Amino acid sequence: MLADQLEYVIGVDPHRDRHALAVVRAPSGEVVYETDVVASTGGYQAALETARVHAPGPRVFAVEGSGSYGRGLSRFLSGSGERVVEVSRVRRDRRGGKTDALDAVRAARGVLADRKSAAAPRAGGRREALRALLVARQGGQAAKRAALNQLRALIVTCPEPLRAELSELSRARLLTRLSAARPAARRDPELRGTLIALRTIAGRIHYLTRDERQLTREIEQLVQELAPDLLTEAGVGPICAAQAIVAYSHHGRLRDEAAFARLAGTAPIPAASGLNNRHRLDRGGDRQLNQALHTILVNRRRIHQPTRDYIARRTSEGKTTREAIRCLKRYLARHLYRQLTKAPMPT
């Protein structure tokens, strides 16, 4: 257990402006010292000095949200040679109260209660660049979907004969037609206003599509540098590969492939009752990683004959299609983890 290797755990509950710290003695779980620091370089230095004074032995910082508000502190501590582990946000028992100081204590004791070593914070460098590109692409896709929905809604209600003309066009021809529209001064203000709105939305969609393609090229280049073999796997494109790399982060972050499966939400969860012995899908974990695995399986069901054969065999044995896919997700998580452990993963 991690607690056997330590004398102190410093739990951290980070927020935008201030971080709460709690120094806990590892063998007993006793709270030795509590404080809070400003979320700045000076505050990070104060947190380090607090650890040196009140936790002089072997210690570890347990940071909740090390990829969000705790990112700056985690980076500073790791750069100073301190050991930092990532703590998942835990479900609070409101009967025990809720303050930032209590959350910091719970973060520290959560590490002590873990039977195995906790995960290290996700790495920076190329991996962080990849995460930022994925965030930008996902935001652009959401904006593009919203614009397409607005476009369809306006076409449904636009005046005739414009509605009849636009309804017959494919998406590509529709966007080209609207981008070239030049609404002149008209006596009909409804028609002029509708054409201006349609042209504006079409231009927005063109802009977002161009951005999406550029971001995808950047993502694929980084994937080629970090884990090129992932792109040779059936059904794995650059976006799904990038999501797997972001979750895996770096060698040594996750203890084994079972931890990666738990992170991906693919670990089997018993759902037996009476004579019914079965497992169900996990609704927890990294949902973006889980979605990437689902996308890979959707692609493999189209192009990968072994995947189709496996689903047919398991359904013939009495499994539902959903249960067969759950099994495949678990296998896929194991396979991708092994590929990632062999990847170069430069910083």
Image (tube, rainbow, N blue to C red):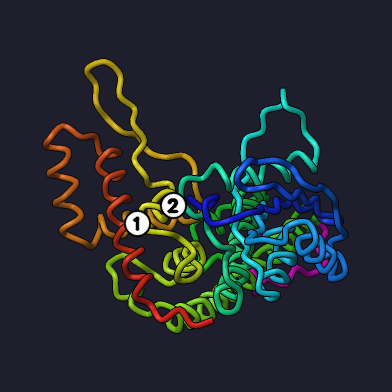
| Quarter containing the C terminus | bottom right
Q: Is residue 196 above or below residue 28?
A: below
Q: Is residue 159 magenta?
A: no
Q: Quadrant of residue 317?
A: top left
Name the residue carrying label 1: 333
Distance of mark 2 from mark 1, alpha carbons?
A: 7 Å
Measured from the top left, where is residue 236 in percent x and y? 35, 67
Residue, x 35% and y 59% (percent of image)? Answer: 296
Horizontal side of residue 17 vs 213, given as left or right? right
Q: Is residue 87 visible?
A: yes
Q: Nearer the viewer, residue 104 or 257?
A: 104
Instruction: Using the rendered view, name the quadrant where residue 343 is placed.
Output: bottom left
**Callout 1: few (<14), some (14-19), or many (20+) C-alpha neighbours within 10 Å?**
many
Q: Secondary structure at mark 2?
A: helix
Residue density around tag 2, few if under 14, some if 14–19, many if 20 or more, within 10 Å = many
Q: As drawn, is 267 to the left or to the right of 203?
A: left
